Amino acid sequence: MTNDVIGIDLGGTAIKLGRFQKDGTCIQSLTVATPQPSTPKAVVEVMADAIAQLNPNHSVIAIGVGTPGPADAAGRIARVAINLNNWLDIPLADWLEAKTGCPTIIANDANCAGLGEAWLGAGRPFRHLIMLTLGTGVGGAIILDGKLFVGSQGAAGELGLITFNPDGPACNSGNQGSLEQYLSIGAIRRRIGKDPAELGRLANGGNLEALDFWNHYGRDLGAGLASLIYVLTPEAIVIGGGVSASAKFFLPAAWAEIERRVLPSSRAGLQLLTATLGNQAGMVGAAKLALQMRNDEL
């Protein structure tokens, strides 16, 4: 018997798995294609086969899974899984435990990414932090005293869905003018007609329109973060997701906006950082979730 765990990042096109020791060392990793159509039974079969490759001797003590959607507070049920077919209230942890014989826990993938950055990434020095993932949507994670905070129903940490402008564009969540409607990739395209990668290249070349856009983007980010800082007073804020590739162009404006809006007493020592784990963060965080589950049981 070892103290190894398996962390899994379940995505719409790929499933990333890693076997981790308790100090965070990844001793083996594997990526498999998500079956199409990605029905629950088909996905679980593929996940179970991949887990068997990483756990041939049945020595792993727990499995953690990050899913593209909310999970219940107990970390057992995938309520909805975005970009997967026919996922609604799927008892994913129970199904995987039945297939593998290994204790399993699940959480939202953005939550897992935040936990991963807190464990092995940019958030390592801190016990209290938040993460914002800027991509197709705007996800988030709240880490309090080193542990993922999911709230009473398991759906906490949807930081991108806070109201930013009451009269702004409609959001898929049902909100209007959410922060996501100003910071996501789609919002960027709507506002300026270009993709973030192109805007990053233009800004690198000194293009004034691109630089001005990123300045305004940073101000919006800072204004949104101000509300979160007042509520949570984190030690650090970690910015990840695809848009963070251009962080050097918008974080200075975001920080200036935070300084303008937030009292010094609420931001003392606060650091604004970019994520360092890239697309491995979800898998790493899922492994940490598994370790914490076992530690809580002991």
Image (cartoon, rainbow, N blue to C red):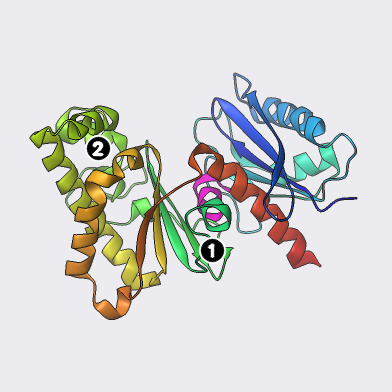
Please state which of residues 123 and 78 is positioned toward the viewer in this rendering: 123
**Residue 164 seen by the camera:** no
For numbered disc 1, what is the local secondary structure?
Answer: loop
Q: Earlier in the sequence, mark 1 or mark 2?
A: 1
The image position of residue 284, as x and y in percent, is 61, 46
| Local crowd size for mark 2, using a 10 Å CA cut-off: few (<14), some (14–19), many (≥20) | some
**Residue drawn at point x = 15 percent, y = 35 percent:** 210
**Residue drawn at point x = 31 percent, y = 46 percent:** 180
Residue 191 lies in quadrant: top left
Residue 100 vertical position relative to residue 229 in the rendered view, above or below? above
| Local crowd size for mark 1, using a 10 Å CA cut-off: few (<14), some (14–19), many (≥20) | some
Residue 23 lies in quadrant: bottom right
Residue 293 vertical position relative to residue 276 in the rendered view, above or below? below
Residues tagged 1 and 2 counted as in contact (Cβ below 8 A): no
Residue 114 within the magenta-colored segment of the rendering: yes
- What amino acid is found at the position of numbered circle 1 in the picture? Phe
Please state which of residues 96 and 114 is positioned toward the viewer in this rendering: 114
Residue sitting farthest toward the bottom: 265
For numbered disc 2, what is the local secondary structure?
Answer: helix
The image position of residue 222, as x and y in percent, is 24, 58
- What amino acid is found at the position of numbered circle 2 in the picture? Ala
Instruction: Provide the residue designation for mark 1.
Output: 149
- Start-end of magenta stretch: 107-115
Residue 190 lies in quadrant: top left
Residue sitting farthest toward the front: 205
